[in-house]
Image (cartoon, rainbow, N blue to C red):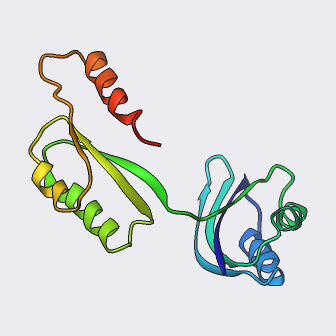
Amino acid sequence: MNNYILKIDCTDSKGLIYKISDVLYKSDLNIVKNDEFVDSENSKFFFRAIVNGGVEKNNLIKKLKDSMPHDANIELMQRRRKKIVIMATKESHCLGDLLLKEYSDDLNAEVVAVVSNYDYLKELVDKFNIPYHFVCHQGLSRDEHEKKVIEVLQNYE
């Protein structure tokens, strides 16, 4: 079974969760996780779900569009692990948490490198066999430093 991410935004109206759930159920899809939010000030509805099952993308989107307000934006994409580069500075707690989550396969991402403006965290990153790039910012303007960081990032997809 494949996991997909479904994102919908539209004008808010009564029964949207029911309508979405009904289409997904009738399409033999299981909602693994979902979140919704209503911007009351602008009467906008936002929905994001991870669904599981066999999907005929165009058919599902058509069914959803038929049951949603006319301004509905609907995206359906296969859920996949993304390749990411982590930007870090001196603090280890956030970086360490992300590295541990990736190590235990809880991040849904592959950390391909860490780029930092300090060299303090290299030893930590080395424990995970992930490339660490120190791009010193001292003595550089913000634009100069940014250019050096971009040079490093261009080595990764």
Quarter of the view holding residue 15: bottom right
Q: Position of residue 67 (x, y in %)?
A: 87, 66
- Residue 77 appears left or right of 92: right
Q: How many marks?
A: 0
Q: Position of residue 148 (x, y in %)?
A: 29, 24
Quarter of the view holding residue 144: top left
Q: Nearer the viewer, residue 2 or 28?
A: 2
Q: Is residue 119 above or below residue 97?
A: above
Q: Residue at x 62, y 54 (%)?
A: 40
Q: Is residue 87 above or below residue 128?
A: above
Would residue 62 be visible to someone looking at this image? Answer: yes
Q: Nearer the viewer, residue 48 or 98?
A: 98
Q: Residue at x 83, y 69 (%)?
A: 56
Q: Is residue 115 above or below residue 144?
A: below
- Residue 82 appears left or right of 54: left
Quarter of the view holding residue 3: bottom right
Q: Residue at x 20, y 60 (%)?
A: 96
Q: Position of residue 62 (x, y in %)?
A: 88, 62
Q: Residue at x 11, y 40 (%)?
A: 119
| The N terminus lies in quadrant | bottom right
Would residue 11 be visible to someone looking at this image? Answer: no
- Residue 85 appears left or right of 33: left
